[in-house]
Image: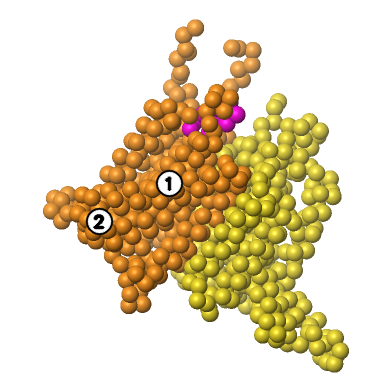
């Protein structure tokens, strides 16, 4: 029997993007209410917000390069883990470990840029992989709940980083609580000429290109390789996958290692492109936790995550400068995520028809 | 010996100071998880509770009213989470993530509205009382030669146990909830709902109602946890007072195999290590950051060596669809 043609309405109500856009609309509405309650005119506030994102070339580059890149990668990390049936709540710690690995290589390994930059990135990837894989190992070997161990590892990474930052040979000295700067050879900031031509901010960096490449790589792994197939199979139904001869334990570790590597890459890029150092933390920075939101807004699809990362990053940037408290953006993001969650009810209402007797 | 007893007293006191916020939140988490609803929004619920407690504590003054208000604020977020997870069959992780964002976002946003644009409240007028204070003082004054000696100011017992009411309430709640979980009909319902909602439903247990109650209660308790920071440990709200403790509470619950008494042990472990860190941190040759890692490393090692697998309630994280 030929497949029944979907009506336009069915196409829309079956499409995840429709619910995401609806949720974003709701998020903006609630944000407007919050703004109004706090005594701001929501329309002019939103206008200012968009102006702060798009108004000037260097604002655009702040929005879409500096602020978005880390969220795209941590979002990708979390999204990948969701696809494979684990919940990477440890991206926060993996991010930190990646940053530490990159900063150490960037400070201490004397090498020309073409070697040093890949070296920093590889160091971060390996560190992140290891950090993720340990959690996987604890889960499959000792049955330690991965959510619990990742929460622990977030804090261990946090204090480990603070420990490294305060080492005599690493700290910058003079009572300052951050590391020495990485060598110029390890920086991935665009050259001055390039910037002048494109009107980007002085801190625009090549990390965004790396992030986009990562998006394609992860999409390829998930959709086009047997590894991706096995990972999804384990995520979807572990018992069925094992019955089909897939080694679930091994695949869980691989999934967590790749997920860890992605978050660590975000940390490395933040060091090599933006900060050039690691500072002592006063609190967790939230890149990993925000990655969860980005992954969810992006519907755990790699390209969705890319867009969600741009969306999240640009609003975060604009939120710091558009006048009203930046927490409006947090409220909006929270609402968007919440509406995405409850849109499952809408979907049930839209798509459930009294079909009994038919088919 | 005196020095030792004094230090011991301080460590116990610090443990009793750092444990309650985690304990309230962990008990809340127990209810929610045990009934089959994953609640990673505990962090956000604690934050809103911490702020509400501090705000009422400043504007109204009565710390008990503030404490209760904080619980109610948390309960409202619990209601949101319950609506999403139970009524809408939402993905519970998504809803919890949203609650975390909303909790901290709303707390700081409202804080700025009421406190001249600051992200920090003014100190509360009155902290929660030290309930044993009067007893200790009267014992020390009335029986200066006998039993009163034990209760003198800055004596061991005074140093160790003369702490805020919120601490004692938290530990009493463990007892109460243990009873509810394992000795009452409602406890049986909620465990059944978390393990096999369909079977529970068949037996006439209202799955939706039980889950709603448990999730709202988890918000209420997380709110109390937040307030026990701002009304006892410190006396004002700022965005960093909660950071991470909600997640630690969740970890403590998994550590404690989803029972109130187990979660309590987990919380005490974290509370104790936190206390130890504060004591050792100031005067130690070991870098403070390495000491700070201890609780987290110890937790994982404990699980690896002694505790082993923590079995998640079977229906945890799965929305329940009532078949028609």
Where residue B38 appears, as percent x and y from the top left, is 62, 45
Question: What colour is chain B?
Answer: yellow
In the image, residue A341 sits, relative to residue A108, either above or below, namely above
Q: State the residue position of label 2.
A: A186
**The chain in orange:** A
Name the chief secondary structure element in magenta. Answer: helix
Label 2: which secondary element: helix
Q: Which residue is most to the bottom?
A: B145
| Circle 1: element type | helix
Q: Which mark is residue A297?
A: none
Say which chain tag 2 marks: A
Q: Is residue B286 left or right of residue B232?
A: left
Tell me if mark 1 has few (under 14), some (14-19) or many (20+) residues whose alpha carbon lies within 10 angstroms of its own: many
The residue range painted magenta reads A231-241
Q: Residue furthest top?
A: A1
Is A65 positioned to the left or the right of B260 in the image?
left
Q: Which residue is mark 1?
A: A129
The answer to whether residue B239 of the structure is visible from this angle is: yes
Image position of A123 (left or right of B192): left
Q: Is the Cβ of the residue at disc 2 closer than 8 Å to that at disc 1? A: no
Q: Position of residue A333 (x, y in %)?
A: 46, 49
User: Which of marks 1 and 2 precedes in the sequence?
Assistant: 1
Above/below status of B120 relative to B301: below
Write down the quadrant of residue B268 in the picture.
bottom right
Seen at 53% across and 68% down, the residue is B291
Residue under the point 52% across and 28% down: A246
What subunit carries mark 1? A
């Amino acid at each position: 029997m030929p497949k029944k043609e979907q009506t336009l309405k069915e196409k829309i109500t079956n499409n995840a993007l429709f619910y995401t856009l609806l949720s974003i609309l709701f998020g903006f509405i609630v944000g407007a209410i919050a703004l109004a309650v706090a005594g701001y005119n929501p329309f002019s506030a939103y206008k200012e917000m968009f102006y702060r994102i798009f108004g000037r070339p260097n604002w655009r580059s702040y929005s879409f390069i500096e602020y978005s890149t880390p969220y795209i990668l941590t979002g990708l990390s979390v999204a990948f883990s969701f696809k494979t049936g684990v919940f990477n709540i440890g991206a926060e710690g993996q991010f930190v470990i990646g940053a530490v690995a990159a900063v150490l290589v960037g400070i201490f390994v004397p090498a020309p840029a073409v070697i040093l930059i890949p070296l920093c990135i590889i160091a971060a990837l390996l560190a992140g992989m290891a950090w993720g894989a340990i959690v996987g190992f604890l889960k499959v070997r000792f049955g330690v709940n991965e959510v619990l161990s990742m929460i622990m590892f977030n804090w261990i990474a946090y204090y480990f980083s603070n420990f490294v930052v305060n080492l005599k040979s690493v700290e910058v000295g003079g009572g300052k609580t951050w590391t020495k700067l990485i060598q110029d050879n390890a920086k991935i900031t665009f050259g001055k000429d390039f910037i002048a031509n494109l009107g980007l901010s002085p801190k625009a960096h090549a990390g965004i290109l790396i992030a986009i490449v990562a998006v394609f790589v992860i999409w390829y792994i998930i959709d086009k390789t047997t590894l991706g197939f096995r990972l999804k199979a384990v995520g979807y139904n572990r018992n069925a996958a094992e019955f089909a001869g897939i080694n679930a334990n091994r695949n869980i570790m691989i999934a967590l290692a790749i997920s860890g590597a992605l978050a660590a890459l975000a940390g490395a890029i933040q060091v090599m492109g933006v900060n050039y150092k690691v500072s002592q933390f006063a609190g967790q920075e939230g890149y990993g936790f925000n990655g969860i939101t980005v992954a969810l807004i992006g519907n755990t699809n790699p390209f969705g995550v890319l867009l969600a990362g741009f969306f999240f990053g640009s609003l975060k940037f604009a939120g710091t400068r558009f006048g009203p408290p930046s927490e409006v953006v947090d409220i909006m993001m929270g609402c968007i995520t919440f509406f995405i969650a409850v849109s499952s009810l809408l979907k049930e209402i839209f798509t459930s028809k009294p079909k009994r007797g038919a088919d | 010996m005196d020095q030792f007893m004094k230090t011991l007293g301080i460590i116990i006191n610090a443990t009793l100071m750092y444990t309650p916020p985690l304990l309230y939140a962990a008990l809340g988490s127990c209810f929610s998880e045990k009934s089959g609803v994953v609640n990673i929004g505990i962090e956000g619920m604690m934050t809103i509770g911490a702020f509400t407690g501090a705000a009422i504590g400043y504007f109204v003054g009565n710390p008990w009213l503030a404490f209760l208000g904080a619980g109610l604020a948390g309960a409202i977020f619990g209601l949101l989470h319950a609506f999403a997870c139970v009524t809408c069959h939402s993905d519970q992780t998504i809803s919890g993530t949203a609650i975390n964002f909303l909790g901290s976002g709303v707390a700081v946003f409202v804080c700025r509205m009421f406190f001249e644009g600051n992200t920090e409240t003014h100190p509360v007028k009155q902290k929660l009382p030290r309930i044993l204070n009067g007893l200790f003082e009267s014992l020390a004054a009335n029986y200066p030669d006998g039993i009163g000696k034990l209760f003198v100011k800055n004596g061991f017992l005074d140093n160790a146990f003369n702490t805020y009411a919120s601490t004692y309430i938290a530990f009493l709640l463990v007892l109460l909830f243990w009873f509810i979980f394992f000795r009452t009909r409602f406890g049986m319902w909620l465990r059944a709902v978390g393990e096999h909602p369909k079977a529970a439903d068949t037996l006439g247990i209202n799955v939706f109602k039980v889950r709603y109650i448990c999730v709202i209660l988890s918000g209420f308790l997380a709110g109390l946890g937040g307030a026990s920071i701002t009304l006892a440990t410190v006396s004002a709200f700022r965005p960093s007072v909660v950071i991470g403790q909600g997640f630690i509470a969740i970890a403590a619950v998994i550590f404690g195999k989803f029972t109130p008494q187990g979660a309590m042990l987990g919380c005490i472990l974290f509370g104790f290590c936190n206390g130890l860190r504060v004591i050792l941190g100031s005067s130690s040759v070991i870098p403070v950051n390495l000491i700070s890692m201890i609780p987290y490393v110890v937790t994982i090692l404990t699980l690896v060596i002694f505790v082993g697998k923590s079995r998640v309630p079977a229906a945890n994280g799965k929305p329940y669809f009532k078949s028609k």
